[in-house]
Amino acid sequence: MKKILKGKLVAILSLVFLVVIAGCGIEKEEETSGEKKEGGVIKIGVIVAETGPASTLGSAQAKTVELLQKQLDEAGPIDGNKIQLIKQDYETNDTKAVVAMDKLISEGVVAVTGATQSSTTMAIIPKAIEKKLPLFTIAPIQSDSEYVYSMAQSTTVIAIPIVEYLKKNNIKKVAWVNASDGFGVTGKPAFEALAKENGIEIIAHEEFDATATDMTIQLTKVRKSNPEAIIVWSRTPGAGIIARNFKALNFDIPMIQSTAAANQGFLEQVKDDNENILVVGSKLSVIDQLPDSDQKEMLKAFNDSYVKEFNSKPDLFAAHLLDGVNVVVNAIKAGNVTSEDIHNYLQNDLGTYLGATGTFDFGVSQASPEPDGISVLSIENNDWKFTE
């Protein structure tokens, strides 16, 4: 894991004070001499699933937008410019997300953060590429576009703590179960390659429809292969349903789920019956259990502000949104207020950046943060427990 070098102090300050200034359309009146006057508006687009089935992930992101806008308003203009976050709820509908993207572009944003789901993100990426608009994705996706910055961990990065957990517990044979949707099918290839390098074998594989209400058949089939652990790649509510089926069948092995289950909705689904159920989650969810570090300090700052505002805790999905907006604050503070300038700054000048999701270095890779912001978490007293 890379050391946290240039950019760390700036990143921490950005998170502590939640002063989020993202690259967006900057509207300014022109003097008769051609010089720009102060007093414009910088617009940032945000596309999240505030309602609909994916709101189990998107609601915390929508709240984070509200919190950041409040902090921006309290902080006042930056160099005379008001920062405006324009939030679009796409209602867990990919078509509506594309319409929302068009609307944001028409309103003059020059950076967008979104969307909550992987399939939705892939639907809006072509618009960003066409307009050369920096897009900060908050769901696991694969894109080689220079204008796409992934704030969510890639499937390979999510798999890293799972493999580390399996090795630590001497688990060599696992069963794999995934939803057959856009997110669910991405996990196995990435995990399989990493597992093979570490002597771990997938001995059974089953899929289920993402809208299914019972996965007992799939679990019964994988049980016949005698796995030492079951790995599940699905978002809620499916993730919670299969976890309940797992408990009903009295498995005595671990079930490990992906980051898509690292939310309060999943905890509610498995309430009071969650032994041996683990999730790859954010260290943001276990702040008080972490050793002292710069990372802990910054996570605590965001957590405390969020809890004070909403009387609930932020999750990994809120952290993705936070980082997606916050990385641009550094570009703006450095004097970059156009899409092109922000894009160039992030690729060439930002350097290593410590975010709430993990450590980023866009000059090296735009595909994912490092795995230092996540860990395999267990559940104790219906809350997350740090396992390291």
Image (spheres, rainbow, N blue to C red):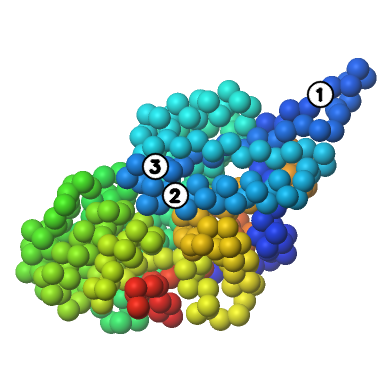
The answer to which image quadrant residue 91 occupies is: top left
Along the horizontal axis of the image, is 355 left or right of 37? left
Residue farthest right in this picture: 33
The answer to whether the residues at label 3 and label 2 have Cβ atoms under 8 Å apart is: no
* Residue at the image position 45 percent from the left and 26 percent from the top: 99
Front in this rendered view, residue 136 or 77:
77
Front in this rendered view, residue 129 or 293:
293
Marked residue nearer the N-terminal end (3 or 1): 1
Residue 59: image tag: 2
Measured Cα–Cα span from mark 3 to mark 1:
37 Å
* Residue 2 image point, x, y percent: 58, 67
Q: Amino acid at mark 1?
A: Glu
Q: Is residue 102 above or below residue 198?
A: above
Q: Amino acid at mark 3?
A: Thr
Residue 29: image tag: 1
* Residue at the image position 50 percent from the left and 47 percent from the top: 62
* Residue at the image position 65 percent from the left and 48 percent from the top: 70
Q: Nearer the viewer, mark 3 or mark 1?
A: 3
SS assignment at label 1: loop
Front in this rendered view, residue 352 or 18:
18
Marked residue nearer the N-terminal end (1 or 2): 1
The residue at which mark 3 appears reads as: 51
Marked residue nearer the N-terminal end (3 or 2): 3
* Residue 182 image point, x, y percent: 30, 44
